[in-house]
Image (tube, grey):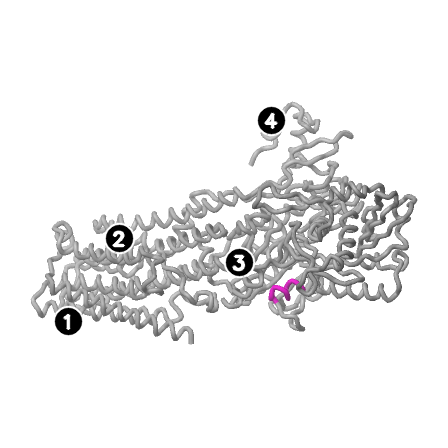
């Protein structure tokens, strides 16, 4: 960490804030730098040690040491290469992901405006300290927790901390938090807490602590321990039997170690790494950046998807969707802040006569407005709001209704007086000169403030009807504004004097609408057996409306919403009973995730704000938004969505299931082959084959079957039904659900056809040991092809190519002089090749039949 003295020495003799070097040094020494705790990069040696602690890797390291001890250096090199490649790939992926996240990161409020000695200055945020006076204006990011001493029409976007989608009005004496954004107005505040002591800093600090192992890591660790014990027992058994039969101790020791290498699927780490790396690569292309490689597989186990609302299920932009006037209602099409859309009623476009009152309503809302719309910098970009997003949505709606542009409205009807929005009055009024010399009064505000006989010149029937419609829209999750106006011959100041006798122009319903893909995404989740849960800081009515529209819950009594205050007053509430949570704080989000995990669910949590950080870290898979997410959320997550699309999570879940299926497929293949080799060595002498295979032959079979062919299995495409089956139970063993039964059946089949080929060769006078060697290798390659989910797919040409290459190398072991000498083999002739080919075909057919039988059983 940089020392205060070093920081101060980097400053000029007097900085932009008027601080001398000595003053800056004193400030830094007293308060430290105003920075939230940043995650420290993991040292390289710790990354490497974390990879090497895997139990399977430890077994391989032990096997390497044994092969070195007996002088079998070639096999020791092969095993060591597997370990090095696996470790390098895992470390490289983590480092690459961390760098990519760092590239997405941006410092919040790198500079701040402060008042020192009565003069405003711009200083680095790191030098803002408690008691500094902060000057806040539109677009500024608040540099520290502070208390407002002045506020003028001040609106603060606190969504990164609270999840609340709408800006919050702030008054003198109220607090503002570091990292929040000023969307409208101005203010002056006194800094009260900075860096780690700020709200943002405390949440970031709560993310410290180690991560729990993923489901895959737990399963493979359990398998590694079982294999280590079983391998040791088999080696000792085989060694003892050989000694009892009078075979040389040296020969039996080498053969026993060779069997140990055969029994351990040493390519499993490489297969796992390749499958995870390919999955991570495919996900990156589709907008999902994996920060930890094992997280790819964990996604396949997800059974609960906890998602926030704003920007994830919704567009994250305010849009006017519905308007009501005394003459009739209308819907407004279009998305975001784009000034393109249509006025519709029951699906048809309004006629000019029908659209007239709607345009009058929206023109008044556009005049009583302090926001703006910024066009995109390039043709593919989006329009963005300037100022209050809600007011920008009114401008966009006016443009969709073909009202004059804002600049033209200001020219035709220049504003000369106003009564700004006041949280107490809940309305805003502006006065405008008309071309004929009259004065136009425009007023907008909350329905309860505007639909008042003291404000409107309207009969009780119209007011009651407007109030009823406003309540209906509010229950549907809309934010409702009422707009009124009048034309006067003259108008005395102040503007509040005009707030009487106005004509009701209508109601405007604004919301953050669901993304077009949200409903389909959640349907895909449910089809895959994943339970969606919405957790938001927004209003309960808004949360429920979005939950119903996207299909999180049904529009019935079962779709209840639990709020943060509900949970605070009833701490024993079953947090897994509800599917929608509103007005939640960071601790409650954390409690919800923990409750689901305690129930045995594998949880994925999406988020973008600082308030989401602890829950993202606690979840099995934390998913952060890359484009609009905060640095704290990105650093806490396992997966970063560069496109901010929830549908990308579904794609990632499919990748996770593909990875897990491929790992299990490889385990069936490799362990069935290893078991068959052991059974051949144990059963061969009973059939008159004294030493069925030599140590070198066993290792050559192992190298060809567990090498490129085994690794190629990690690239197999996803099964067609991958997203139509429920997630596997989190506690399920990796060999459960029929895997070990299929493994043993295949091992028995490979053993039988191999021994049959060997005994037939012996009866025919052929070099039976070489035939047995070739048949055992060919049968395992037949199993590799027979286990494919899609037999004739071209999605993974590497597998059939590697099988063909391994077959050629197997034949080369019988006919290339150097290999014959090394492996002690002989040419087997055409008859021997036919016997091995028959063994391969029989094993292939058996694998296909077993795969079909177990697949049908799993689906039934």
> In front: 10, or 509?
509
Residue at 65% over, 25% down:
21
**Main secondary structure of the magenta stretch:** helix
Tell me the tag on residue 66.
2
Callout in the foreground (1, 2): 1
Task: Name the residue nearer the viewer: 399 or 431.
Answer: 399
Q: Which mark is residue 9?
A: 4
- The image's mark for residue 687 is 1
The x and y percentages for residue 94 are 45, 47
Tell me the quadrant of the picture where the C terminus can be found. Answer: bottom left
Task: Check disc 1: other Cα within 10 Å, few if <14, some if 14-19, many if 20+.
Answer: few
* Tag in front: 1 or 3: 3
Distance between the alpha carbons at the discs numbered 1 and 3: 59 Å
Q: Position of residue 754 (x, y in %)?
A: 19, 67
* Nearest to the observer: residue 355 or residue 108: 355
Percent of width and height locating residue 787: 32, 65
Q: Which residue is mark 3?
A: 647
């Amino acid at each position: 960490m940089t020392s205060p003295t070093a920081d101060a020495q980097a400053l000029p003799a007097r900085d932009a804030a008027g601080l001398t070097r000595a003053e800056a040094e004193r400030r830094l020494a007293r308060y430290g730098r105003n920075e939230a705790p940043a995650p420290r990069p993991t040292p390289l040696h710790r990354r490497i040690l974390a990879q090497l602690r895997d139990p399977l890797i430890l077994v391989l390291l032990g096997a390497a040491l044994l092969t070195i001890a007996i002088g079998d250096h070639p096999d020791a090199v092969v095993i060591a290469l597997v370990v090095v490649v696996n470790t390098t790939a895992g470390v490289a992926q983590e480092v690459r992901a961390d760098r990519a996240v760092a590239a997405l990161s941006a410092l919040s409020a790198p500079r701040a405006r402060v008042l020192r000695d009565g003069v405003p200055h711009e200083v680095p945020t790191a030098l803002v300290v408690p008691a500094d006076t902060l000057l806040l204006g539109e677009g500024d990011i608040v540099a520290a927790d502070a208390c407002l001493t002045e506020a003028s029409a001040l609106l603060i976007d606190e969504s990164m901390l609270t999840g609340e989608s709408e800006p919050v009005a702030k008054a003198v004496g109220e607090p503002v938090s570091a990292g929040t954004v000023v969307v409208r107005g101005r203010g002056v505040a006194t800094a009260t807490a900075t860096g780690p002591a700020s709200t943002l800093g405390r949440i970031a600090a709560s993310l410290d602590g180690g991560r729990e192992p993923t489901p895959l890591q737990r399963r493979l660790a359990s398998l590694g321990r079982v294999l280590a014990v079983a391998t040791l027992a088999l080696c000792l058994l085989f060694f003892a039997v050989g000694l009892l039969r009078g075979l040389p101790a040296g020969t039996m020791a080498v053969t026993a170690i060779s069997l140990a290498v055969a029994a351990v699927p040493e390519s499993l780490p490489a297969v796992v790494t390749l499958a995870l790396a390919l999955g991570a690569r495919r996900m990156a292309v589709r907008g999902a950046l994996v920060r930890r490689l094992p997280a790819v597989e964990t996604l396949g186990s997800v059974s609960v998807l906890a998602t926030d609302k704003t920007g994830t299920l919704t567009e994250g932009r305010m849009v006017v969707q519905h308007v009501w006037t005394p003459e009739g209602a209308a819907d407004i099409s279009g998305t975001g802040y784009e000034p393109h859309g249509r006025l519709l009623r029951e699906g048809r476009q309004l006629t000019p006569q029908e659209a007239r009152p709607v345009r009058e309503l929206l023109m008044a809302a556009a005049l009583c407005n302090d926001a703006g719309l910024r066009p995109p910098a390039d043709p593919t970009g989006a329009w963005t709001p300037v100022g209050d997003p809600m007011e920008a949505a009114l401008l966009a709606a006016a443009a969709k209704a073909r009202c004059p542009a804002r600049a033209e409205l200001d020219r035709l009807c220049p504003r000369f007086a106003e009564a700004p929005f006041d949280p107490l009055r809940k309305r805003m009024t502006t006065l405008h000169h008309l071309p004929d010399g009259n004065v136009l009064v425009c007023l907008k505000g909350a329905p309860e403030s505007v639909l008042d006989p003291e404000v409107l010149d309207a009969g009780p029937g119209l007011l009651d009807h407007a109030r009823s419609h406003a309540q209906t829209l509010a229950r549907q999750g809309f934010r409702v504004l009422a707009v009124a106006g009048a034309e006067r011959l003259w108008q005395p100041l102040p503007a509040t004097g005009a707030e009487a006798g106005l004509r009701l122009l209508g109601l405007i319903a604004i919301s953050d609408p669901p993304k077009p893909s949200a409903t389909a995404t959640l349907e895909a989740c449910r089809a895959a057996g994943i339970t969606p849960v919405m957790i938001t800081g927004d209003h309960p009515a808004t949360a429920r409306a979005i939950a119903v529209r996207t299909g999180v819950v049904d529009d019935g009594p079962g779709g209840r919403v639990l709020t943060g205050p509900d949970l605070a007053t009833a701490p024993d509430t079953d947090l897994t009973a509800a599917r929608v949570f509103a007005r939640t704080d960071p601790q409650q989000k954390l409690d919800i995730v923990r409750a689901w995990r305690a129930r045995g669910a594998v949880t994925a949590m999406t988020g973008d704000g600082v308030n989401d950080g602890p829950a993202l870290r606690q979840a099995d898979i934390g998913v952060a938004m890359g484009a609009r997410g905060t640095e704290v959320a990105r650093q806490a997550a396992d997966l970063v969505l560069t496109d901010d699309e929830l549908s990308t999570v579904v794609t990632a879940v499919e990748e996770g299931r593909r990875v897990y299926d491929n790992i299990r497929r490889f385990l069936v293949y490799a362990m069935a082959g290893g078991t068959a080799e052991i059974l051949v060595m144990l059963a061969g002498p009973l059939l008159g084959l004294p030493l069925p295979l030599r140590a070198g032959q066993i290792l050559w079979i192992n190298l060809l079957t567990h090498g490129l062919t085994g690794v190629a299995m990690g690239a197999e495409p996803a099964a067609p039904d991958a997203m139509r089956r429920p997630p596997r139970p989190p506690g399920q063993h990796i060999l459960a659900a029929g895997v070990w039964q299929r493994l043993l059946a295949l091992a028995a089949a490979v053993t039988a056809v191999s021994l049959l080929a060997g005994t037939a060769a012996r009866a025919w006078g052929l070099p039976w040991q070489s035939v047995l060697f070739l048949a055992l290798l060919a049968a395992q390659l037949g199993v590799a092809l027979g286990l494919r989910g899609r037999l004739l797919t071209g999605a993974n040409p590497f597998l059939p190519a590697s099988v063909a290459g391994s077959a050629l190398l197997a034949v080369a072991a019988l006919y290339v002089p150097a290999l014959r000498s090394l492996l002690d083999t002989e040419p087997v002739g055409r008859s021997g090749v036919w016997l091995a080919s028959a063994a391969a075909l029989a094993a292939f057919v058996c694998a296909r039949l077993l795969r079909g039988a177990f697949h049908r059983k799993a689906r039934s």
